[in-house]
Amino acid sequence: MIQNNPVSHAIDVVGEAWTMLILREAFRGARQFEDWLSRLTIARSVLARRLKIMTAAGLLEARLYQTRPERYEYLLTEMGRDLFGVAVMLTLWEQDWSPRADPARAVRFMRRSSGEEVRPIMSGDDPTRALSPYDVMPAPGPNPDFAPRMKAMRRRRVQPAQRGASGPIELGVELFGDYWTNLVLAAAFYRIRRYDDFLSKLDISTSVLADRLNAMVAHGILEKRRYRTRPERFDYVLTERGLALYPVVLAFFAWGQRWLCPEDTAPVILVDRVIGAQVLPRLTDALTGEVIDPRSVRAAPARTHADRTQAASG
């Protein structure tokens, strides 16, 4: 279930750092080739290749806007727009939990029609309460052997050029933009803790596993806990920062289930830990319980602590 589930299949389509950065800028209004070129530290050839791949995958639609010379703009399709939940959850996690976060770039989400604040969460049956890893658990779906068309596995780490000249890329993009980190993170949410268990459950080499575990410990996603002294052995346990990634995982799960696992073919589903009923994660507004349509909200600069305090007292 670790390697054949809606999350892993979603990652096969969009879990590559450049793809995620291009999608991020698309949600911020990028449409034309030069838009991405000016916003990202990316080579023209790499950008052209990624846009072509994303168009073929159905995430973007190319529309001719100039004939001489021929120029195209790239618009999010319905499939691409539906990744809004992933983009929002990554943004919120980065702001709240990443040591690389820039407070000056923090955002909040507002309704376009009224200007009222929206508080996005990944929810279940109660649309005003965020799902946690303690609420649900994975279970075999109606077709455990089903696997959608698979992309080539992206097993390389984020390349130095992708980190940008002004500093490293967002930590969330680095984590979810690396195939092996995703796999190790998935196993951690499946309660795999020990090195030998990671090795036996995943199709991964010892050197790659050690590298990813060490990196996730360094990033504060996992914590090492000694359970044996001779020889020395450790558990790798999700920290509070690591557990806070769960809404991102849920957003990937929901998108992968909708677009890559047709009805009654899902290899894995989520079920309520208490009653065993299936749970379908959704992006909703915790303040109203309404499902969030990406076209109905906009990002705005986050209020400062002083602004929030003044608003609360008023």
Image (cartoon, rainbow, N blue to C red):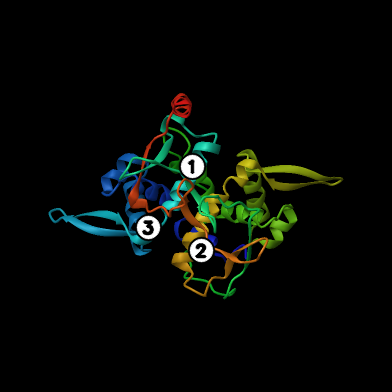
Q: What amino acid is at disc 2?
A: His
- What element does badge 3 sit on? helix
Q: Is residue 177 visible?
A: no
Camera-side mark, 3 or 1: 1
Q: Nearer the viewer, residue 302 or 221?
A: 302
Q: Position of residue 178 (x, y in %)?
A: 53, 51
Quick check: 157 above or below 79? above
- In what element is the residue under mark 2? helix
Q: Residue at x 52, y 58 (%)?
A: 281
Question: Of residues 47 and 305, which is closer to you in this image?
Answer: 305
The x, y position of residue 140, in whole percent, is 62, 70
Q: Is residue 197 above or below residue 171?
A: below
Q: Total marks drawn?
A: 3
Q: Which circle marks residue 92 in the picture? A: 1
Q: Residues within 10 Å of mark 3 (few under 14, many from 20)?
A: many
The residue under label 2 is 9
Disc sitting over residue 80 in the figure: 3
Looking at the rendered image, the quarter that the N terminus falls into is bottom right
Q: Residues within 10 Å of mark 2 (few under 14, many from 20)?
A: many
- Residue visible at 31% across and 43% down in the picture: 37
Find residue 64 and report its horizontal and vertical position in percent. 19, 58
Q: Are marks 3 and 2 in contact (CB under 8 Å)?
A: no
- Amino acid at dot 3: Gly
Q: Residue at x 42, y 49 (%)?
A: 18
